[in-house]
Image (cartoon, rainbow, N blue to C red):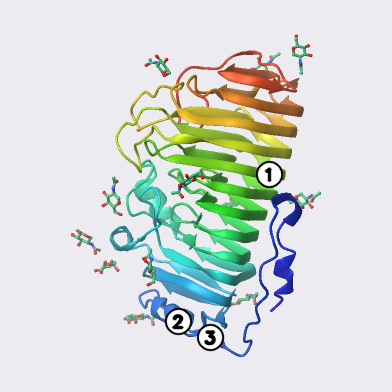
Amino acid sequence: MNLLAIATLFSAVVLGLSPPTIVERNPSKVCVVPAAGNSSIDDTPAVLKAFDQCGHGGKILFQNTTYHINSVMNTTGLKDCEIDLRGTLLWSTNVSYWLNHSLPVGYQNQSTAWVFGGKNIRFDGHGYGTFNGNGQTWYDACGSVSNYPGRPHALTVSETSNSEFTGLRFVQSQMWTLSIIHSQNTLFDNIYVNSTSVKSSSRNTDGADTIYSSHITFRNWEVDNGDDSISMKANSTDILIEDSLFHRGLGIAIGSIGQYKDAYETIERVRARNITYSKTLHAVYFKTWTGEQVNYPPNGGGGGLGYASDMVFEDLKATALRGPAIAISQCTTFSGTAGNCTSSKFQLRDLSFKDLTGTTTSQDVASFQCSAVKPCENISITGVDLEVSSNGTLADEYLCGNVEGTRGFNCTGAVCVGGSATGGC
Ligand SMILES: *[C@@H]1O[C@H](CO)[C@@H](O)[C@H](O)[C@H]1NC(C)=O
Ligand SMILES: *[C@@H]1O[C@H](CO)[C@@H](O)[C@H](O)[C@H]1NC(C)=O
Ligand SMILES: *[C@@H]1O[C@H](CO)[C@@H](O)[C@H](O)[C@H]1NC(C)=O
Ligand SMILES: *[C@@H]1O[C@H](CO)[C@@H](O)[C@H](O)[C@H]1NC(C)=O
Ligand SMILES: *[C@@H]1O[C@H](CO)[C@@H](O)[C@H](O)[C@H]1NC(C)=O
Ligand SMILES: *[C@@H]1O[C@H](CO)[C@@H](O)[C@H](O)[C@H]1NC(C)=O
Ligand SMILES: *[C@@H]1O[C@H](CO)[C@@H](O)[C@H](O)[C@H]1NC(C)=O
Ligand SMILES: *[C@@H]1O[C@H](CO)[C@@H](O)[C@H](O)[C@H]1NC(C)=O
Ligand SMILES: *[C@@H]1O[C@H](CO)[C@@H](O)[C@H](O)[C@H]1NC(C)=O
Ligand SMILES: *[C@@H]1O[C@H](CO)[C@@H](O)[C@H](O)[C@H]1NC(C)=O
Ligand SMILES: *[C@@H]1O[C@H](CO)[C@@H](O)[C@H](O)[C@H]1NC(C)=O
Ligand SMILES: *[C@@H]1O[C@H](CO)[C@@H](O)[C@H](O)[C@H]1NC(C)=O
């Protein structure tokens, strides 16, 4: 077990991380998880037993076979252990079971199929170990409802630190793929996510979401999905996304945030670099709730306080973006209500975008619908070379509402009026 490698995992200079403690694991303590090989036999008890016996200082080995996961799993409080996934974990499609039993994530009334966590863990899929959420069943069952109560995330990493997840494949996630909450100093490297639907939309299949977490690195991701590629939510700080490829989803999302009335939340020090986009809606978009609370979370809310600041997005290469490359929308509100797009008390400031190139379908480089109550401040955009494929012109519109302090660009017009869940109008 190469624990020394963990010390080099993080971008220590950029994010100011200290190297994690190096702990010896006992290589002889290995729990090989048996698989029954029959979808009507739940392999979950065998999995939980392996975590119980080897989750402290040992190794849990999933062989090259299919494991049927028919029940929720809670494997938290692990320590100094390795998970070696050489096969596929296949989740059952008993929708009524999952709706009744999925475990609380601790944010937005979200829930999960597997809550996992601990300290000094290495979870290695070697590039082929797979989580298969059988998501088509879920896309068909609740495709049009944003947050269907009880619909599970594929994996929630909770209260985890000094850990590494590498070489994992997530296909057909039930809802969000990976939620990362109350976690620090953890690397997610070489991760493939594909949650696409053959018929209905695969809405809410975010690649990853960070909440109440810091010093999280996403490196070498490839995501093909129907929602946020990777999203930073409440109290996400010192987040790095690099060397990644995003297909068809919405791009990198900051938010939504500001959903809880009077709660003070921030998103700070986000860096993204060397990102390639193929047919995503945006490269980067920001989404806050309006200043008025309408109904309650998960699907309603608003009136939250705080700010998102100190972000640098650079070396962004796009092919066929479907909308404005950079979008700010502060209009999120309860579905079916016309939100006030200028009333948010949540501020966006100190945002920098450098070297944004490739092709798009929109003339708009930027669409900034900012709050009049807390205007956006200090936005820099430089090195844009985006061609509108349909006619070969350069995208050159920067549409602004309530933006104070632009660098590298001038606003060219007024932004549209009205809301949408995905930025723009
Ligand atoms: C799978 O398990 C069920 C329930 O134990 C049993 O009825 C069935 O015969 C098994 N199928 C196979 C292919 O072994
Ligand atoms: C896993 O097993 C399958 C056959 O069941 C084989 O085709 C595949 O190469 C094996 N994968 C690895 C990585 O050993
Ligand atoms: C679904 O799960 C419930 C338990 O929550 C069980 O009673 C039911 O038999 C399961 N249905 C199927 C088709 O397995
Ligand atoms: C789910 O819960 C509802 C009400 O709490 C109950 O009627 C139903 O039987 C449960 N379904 C399963 C599969 O456990
Ligand atoms: C998971 O198990 C731990 C330890 O028993 C418990 O404290 C925690 O609340 C459980 N988490 C969930 C989401 O059920
Ligand atoms: C929260 O989720 C639970 C089930 O997980 C559901 O019963 C409840 O209605 C949800 N609350 C809201 C406000 O949607
Ligand atoms: C995702 O899966 C779909 C369906 O299998 C496939 O068409 C698509 O090419 C995959 N995307 C990537 C990036 O591999
Ligand atoms: C940029 O990311 C891609 C993966 O999307 C990787 O292959 C390439 O080596 C990275 N470039 C640099 C300069 O790190
Ligand atoms: C979020 O961060 C703010 C500002 O640091 C802090 O006041 C607040 O307590 C945090 N909220 C939670 C739920 O951790
Ligand atoms: C929207 O909010 C702004 C800022 O609070 C306020 O000035 C404006 O009157 C509101 N618009 C409507 C239609 O309520
Ligand atoms: C090129 O196409 C864009 C997007 O459809 C459109 O907004 C723009 O007006 C077009 N420019 C010219 C010169 O036709
Ligand atoms: C913005 O407009 C000012 C005043 O017309 C001009 O001096 C400046 O060069 C413009 N900046 C850019 C980046 O076009």
Q: In the rendering, at what x and y percent does residue 47 appear?
A: 45, 78
Q: How many numbered discs sit on the rendered protein?
A: 3
Q: Quadrant of residue 263?
A: top left
Q: Earlier in the sequence, mark 1 or mark 2?
A: 2
| Residue 272, label in figure | 1
Question: Tag 2: Cα neighbours inside 10 Å, few (<14), some, or many (≥20)?
Answer: some
- Camera-near label (3 vs 1) is 1
- Would residue 27 be found to the left or right of residue 338 on screen? right
Between 138 and 122, the residue placed more toward the observer is 122
Residue 346 x %, y %: 49, 31
Badge 2 amino acid: Asp
Q: Is residue 295 visible?
A: yes
- Which of the numbered marks, if any, corresponds to residue 52? 2
| Label 3 SS | strand
How packed is label 1: few (under 14 Cα within 10 Å), some, or many (20 or more)? many
Circle 3 packing at 10 Å, graded few (<14), some (14-19), many (20+), is: many
The reply to whether callout 1 and callout 2 are in contact (CB within 8 Å) is no
**x, y percentage for residue 318?**
70, 37
N-terminal label among 3 and 1: 3
Question: Which tag, 3 or 2, sits closer to the chain's start?
Answer: 3
- Residue sitting farthest toward the bottom: 28
Q: Amino acid at mark 3?
A: Cys
**Residue indicated by mark 3:** 31
Task: Residue type at mark 1: give it.
Answer: Ala
Q: Marks 1/2: CA distance?
A: 37 Å
For the residue pair 319 and 123, the one nearer the viewer reads as 123
Residue name at image x 65 percent, y 32 percent: 351
